[in-house]
Image: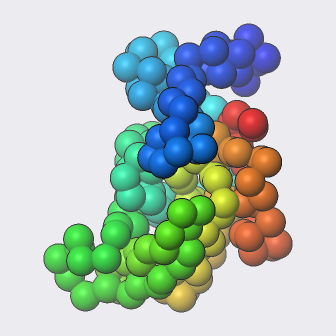
Amino acid sequence: MSESCHASLRAAMRDVPDFPQPGVVFKDITPLLADPVLWDRCMTALLETVRGEKVDKVVGIDARGFIFAAVVADRLGAGFIPVRKKGKLPWRTIGIAYDLEYGSNHIEMHEDAIRPGERVLLIDDILATGGTAAAALSLVRQAGGTIIVASFLVELGFLGGRAKLPPDIRVESVLLY
């Protein structure tokens, strides 16, 4: 993706101070979602992170990760797997608890969502402290999936989330702050 495309995505991002709590500056991606040209650039950039790779399943993290992962899965001809907050999936699940920047959480996925050896792309909107992504990657491995890459639209590098992800996982970010 060209520097002008990156610049257009960066310019459309909105900073929301003191959300969800005082002192946090939230990176709002909704302006990118609302603009069809920018939306297409987001999808193109995320697809570029796995160019030339065979992907069987695309895992999207609740909730904004679903938006990107479902479209990428469709464009790749792969299955889409939602990783959701505890209690939101209707079938038998595997789950994991983890710490967040301001609290803790628990995520789950269906126990039969990924077959052993399937090649998996993990997608989320933002890599911040890394807790959610690390937990989702752990679920993929627990199910026997082979993680090809973990791709994020935005990485907040100053929060050090990349360091919390397994060192053998390739991590790609479209925009780095």
The x, y position of residue 75, in whole percent, is 45, 40
- The residue at the point 47 percent across, 41 percent down is 19
The x, y position of residue 8, in whole percent, is 64, 13
> Horizontally, is 97 left or right of 128 in the view?
left
Image quarter of the N terminus: top right
Above or below 118: residue 12? above
Asked whether 163 or 68 is in front, the reply is 163
Q: How many numbered markers are drawn?
A: 0
Q: Quadrant of residue 42?
A: top right
> Horizontally, is 21 left or right of 1 in the view?
left
Asked whether 54 or 17 is in front, the reply is 17
Above or below 158: residue 13? above
Above or below 80: residue 104? below
Image quarter of the C terminus: top right
Residue 116 in sight in this render: no
Residue at the front extreme?
Answer: 22
The x, y position of residue 20, in whole percent, is 45, 46
The x, y position of residue 171, in whole percent, is 74, 56
Asked whether 56 or 94 is in front, the reply is 94
- The residue at the point 39 percent across, 87 percent down is 94
Residue 124 in sight in this render: yes
Q: How is the image coloured?
A: rainbow
Above or below 4: residue 70? below
- The residue at the point 70 percent across, 45 percent down is 156
> Horizontally, is 125 left or right of 155 in the view?
left
- The residue at the point 38 percent across, 20 percent down is 34
> Horizontally, is 47 left or right of 79 in the view?
right
